[in-house]
Amino acid sequence: MFKKFLIVFAIFFSSFLVSFPADAQNTSSQIPALNPFCWKKKECVDTRRKYVANNPTDEQLAKDGFVTGASVAPCVGGTGNDEWGRCLPAGQSKTEISFGGQDRFSNVGDFILLMYRYLISVAGILAVVVIIFAGVQWITSGGNSETISSAKHRISGAVIGLFIAYGSYFILNTINPALVNLRLPQVWLVRPQQLIPKFCKQLEGAEEGRLKFRFYALESDQVSEVDISKAGNEEMPYGQKDANGLDIFSCGRRFLAEDSGTQTCFGDVCGLEQGNRQGCVEWNSQSPDAVACYKGDLFVSFSIDTESFGLGQQVKEYAADVTVLKHFVEKALQTDWRKDSDVFRAVCKIGNTVYLANRGGANWWNQGSGRKNVIKNVKKGSYHEYIIGYSELADPESLGWNCNKGGSVVGYLLRVETYADQSTWDRFGPSLDQFIVPLYGQVDWAINAIGGPAEPNLAVGYDRRTRQALFGTFSDDVKTINNYIPLDEIKKGGMTLDVRINAGHILRMKSKTGENPSDFPENIEPGVPAQ
């Protein structure tokens, strides 16, 4: 009878041991760039800094709140700062001692589940040890019935203990896996962007041909609800042309990307004829969500973000004054805050050295010059928002730039003057010294108040790693002449930069009102900050 019990238990034990539950499959999009829960490491670190006190290092922020690996699929892939993962707002809890080699847990459910599985393993090991000891006792009993009976009791006790431990798990898991998985709702940060970028070429891997698209609708149908059954069957890479050599991905046409569900993206190709180059811009006075071709080599979207302070730890340390700061940023600039004074400086390159053309001389792109097209100028909230198209940049030779030290023009730096609201600075300036002095040095409010330089310069450059605009002051935000807006990208047509200024940018700009790239040494090796 005892042997039959052991055989039945072994069969039962094997039947559910092999089906020990694995993590549930993630049914999200397999493209991290399309998944709002997927973050790149650098983006997660920068965002978490707004929530975490005590000014932790980037390494600590990533260690405590950036989760990678198969458990957060499909948010996998990439390396370094571009590695994909998921981002926690508050971080993980760290225990004083390690359990099974793990001392960091996202929530208490993870901790209990690990302890349960750890203790089940320990129970299995102890049961095996007891069974081995009882077996030896049985073998060496010499036929003593009392010793054999004691050994049987030990074996049956160990087996029953295993049955209770593993059987309870099996029964609960059969009733409802949630009873044993102990999964608490995990709060992940969501990236503040659309589920799919506006333009197809902005999807990661699109320009390299790793993504395929299906045609959905012509330029005349940009806003209708998506019906996947109406999409074309042919899968094509971004940039494909038709049989006549014409661009399929022209501005305003809609496409479905692989695994993007019902989210469409726009083509962006416009005319590149000499003297009438155009770019695809997401603005239309009748339908703001639509896109259309407008004249320009480079398009810059300018806006003010009154909700994002961008001041890091200083805001947390002076929490009582956040209200003051909020009121300040809502009135720091005039409502129509851009002056008609847009200046480009050309950047030359010879070998590995970059320097400013014309010894730092500037060229103006004012309204009415034919070089500047104001596409959008509308009041939204406290400030105007703008989209500006700049022409003639793709042909630097015709503009008379002189690379006097050799080489050729490789890009540009843009400077835009802004209108400061001086009455607001007079009112809030002294209260803001606690923010400005630790970060940017003392500002002489009295000089500005009596008519000194009041229009801060907004410098605009480009980060070729992230393919995003760098903006604010030259020395604090653009940082080096090597962060120029690249000419080769402008020549492709339709290059668009997003400049969204927050309180930190405004304070830095005001503290260094008249700063220009030409104020720094001409020759700057790539990657070396200006001093």
Image (cartoon, grey):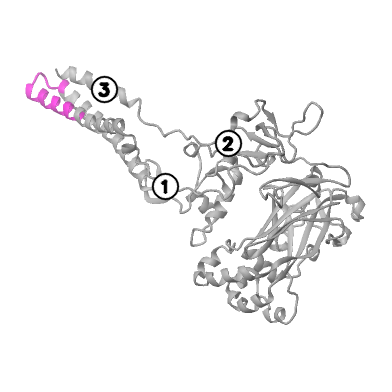
- Report x, y in % for residue 142: 11, 19
Which SS class for mark 2? loop
How far is the residue under mark 1 from the one under mark 2? 32 Å
- Report x, y in % for residue 112: 33, 43
Residues 399 and 121: in front is: 399
**Span of residues in magenta:** 138-158
Give the prevailing secondary structure in the magenta stretch: helix
In the displayed structure, does residue 381 sit left or right of residue 135? right
Which SS class for mark 1? loop
Query: Mark 3 packing: few (<14 Cα in 10 Å), some, or many (20+)?
Result: few
Q: Quadrant of residue 362?
A: bottom right
Three-letter amino acid code of the residue under disc 3: Phe
Residues 304 and 156: in front is: 304
- Report x, y in % for residue 408: 87, 49
Can you identify the residue that label 1 sits on?
Answer: 106
Which SS class for mark 3? helix
Q: Are marks 2 and 3 in contact (CB under 8 Å)?
A: no
Checking the image for residue 12, the label placed there is: 3
Q: Using the image, determine if residue 301 lies above or below residue 269.
A: below
Instruction: Say which residue appears at 25% left-offset and 30% top-offset.
Output: 167
Instruction: Say which residue appears at 57% left-offset and 35% top-offset.
Output: 261
Q: Are marks 1 and 2 in contact (CB under 8 Å)?
A: no
Residues 334 and 177: in front is: 334
How far is the residue under mark 1 from the one under mark 3? 34 Å
Can you identify the residue that label 2 sits on?
Answer: 262
Residue 405 drawn in magenta: no
Q: Locate the N terminus by quadrant.
A: top left
- Report x, y in % for residue 75: 54, 39
Three-letter amino acid code of the residue under disc 1: Ser
In the displayed structure, does residue 111 sit left or right of residue 379? left
Query: Mark 1 packing: few (<14 Cα in 10 Å), some, or many (20+)?
Result: some
Three-letter amino acid code of the residue under disc 2: Thr
